[in-house]
Image: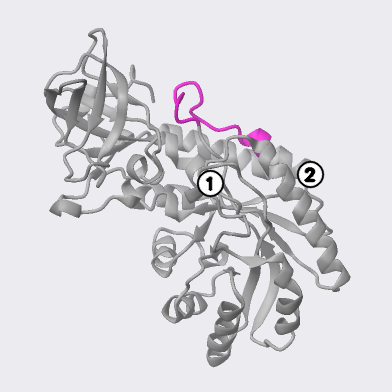
Amino acid sequence: MTKGNFPVDKLKGIETPFYYYDMDLLKKTLKIVKEETKKYGFIQHYAIKANANRRILELIASEGFGADCVSGNEVKVAVNAGFPASKIVFAGVGKTDKEINLALDLNIFCFNVESLPELEIINELANKKGKLARVALRINPNVDAHTHEYITTGLNENKFGFAMAHLDEVMEKLKSLKSVKLIGIHFHIGSQIEDVQVFGPLCKRVNELQTYFEEKEVKLEHINLGGGLGIDYENPDACPVPDFAAYFALFNENLKLGDGQIAHFELGRSIVAQSGVLVTRATYVKHGENKTFVIVDAGMTDLIRPALYQAYHKIENVSSGLPLAKYDVVGPICESSDVFAKGCELNETRRGDMLILRSAGAYGEIMASQYNCRELPKPYYSDKI
């Protein structure tokens, strides 16, 4: 989707703000991911947390993808959207008894376990049901993802996973847990990783750990590398689809899988982000003392990433062909952080102009809130307008 082919005329009668999804781009992206994973026999579980829009989930499930979930409700949403329970992995540091029981009842593929107390509780709850829970140990590899500190997850200082120094204790404990079965190991070092070479050290660490488990005479069937591949927020037209070929090729070249081992991935953002935009309108153009503000009807309640992560989203005025001018684009929420961009160059903007915030298909609609008693933004789709 580009500014030039955005269907302004078809959408101009819809009340803003709303999300708009380019379903053709999403289908193209899914096709490429399927082709690249098939080359190596890899398995892809879509990360539900990136976008849980029902139509999008149904499309992804129909293409044969599995699901990566981080809450009990995500597990339910995934199953309801058509993902087979046999392809669902369930991660998260704080799984409740209710969530674990739900997943056990559904017979999901695997729990990605993040602590010894969690492992013990899963064993206890599975035992009560007479079930054998399949688990993978999420290991914190202490690999720096070189991304924003809020979305870095693989360092020793992060809350996620087992520290490698504790693995001996965990392996000893597993001997006494009769209602869990260790089937693999799991990693996730962070999100929005733009340089695929960052995953090289992860592969090296995984290979080292493979040796550790071999020495313990523990057979691991599944190696889950997580996700984290980033997108190009600054140039969405030039890079509408991430370089999945380079991403999966790196793992194929650097990861030493044993006989019968299967590699799993949990991409989310890179699959859905570029297919979605947040559509808003200019409510006022306000001339301040030192700058000019475009006040739009979307706010941090509709797209929180700029306020939460200082994240960048390209903004375009799709109503104006006038010369460029510089603005601060802000929302109506009663918070000083409700700012989408400062010093943003837009075609000269007037009240009522339609603006789009690009690359908003991930962590956009799913993170929307009703703060200030605002309505949630509605979704619309390119194949349904």
Which amino acid type corresponds to the residue marked 2 in the rendered image?
Answer: Asn
Residue, disc 1: 191
Foreground pick, 170 / 229 = 170
Does the image show residue 104? yes
Quarter holding residue 352: top left
> In terms of secondary structure, where does tag 2 sit?
helix
Q: Quadrant of the N terminus?
A: top left
The answer to if 234 sits in the magenta stretch is yes
Identify the residue at horizontal 47%, vertical 50% (top origin). Answer: 150
Residue, disc 2: 254
Does the image show residue 352? no
Query: Separation of disc 1 and disc 2 at Cα?
Result: 20 Å
Please indicate whether residue 313 sits to the left or right of residue 335 in the image. Answer: right
> In terms of secondary structure, where does tag 1 sit?
loop
Per the rendered image, the range of residues in magenta is 232-247
Comparing labels 1 and 2, the label whose residue is closer to the camera:
1
Foreground pick, 206 / 335 = 335
Q: Are marks 1 and 2 in contact (CB under 8 Å)?
A: no
Identify the residue at horizontal 81%, vertical 57% (top origin). Answer: 208
Please indicate whether residue 290 sits to the left or right of residue 166 in the image. Answer: left
Please indicate whether residue 170 sits to the left or right of residue 327 in the image. Answer: right
Image location of residue 19, percent across then percent down: 28, 39
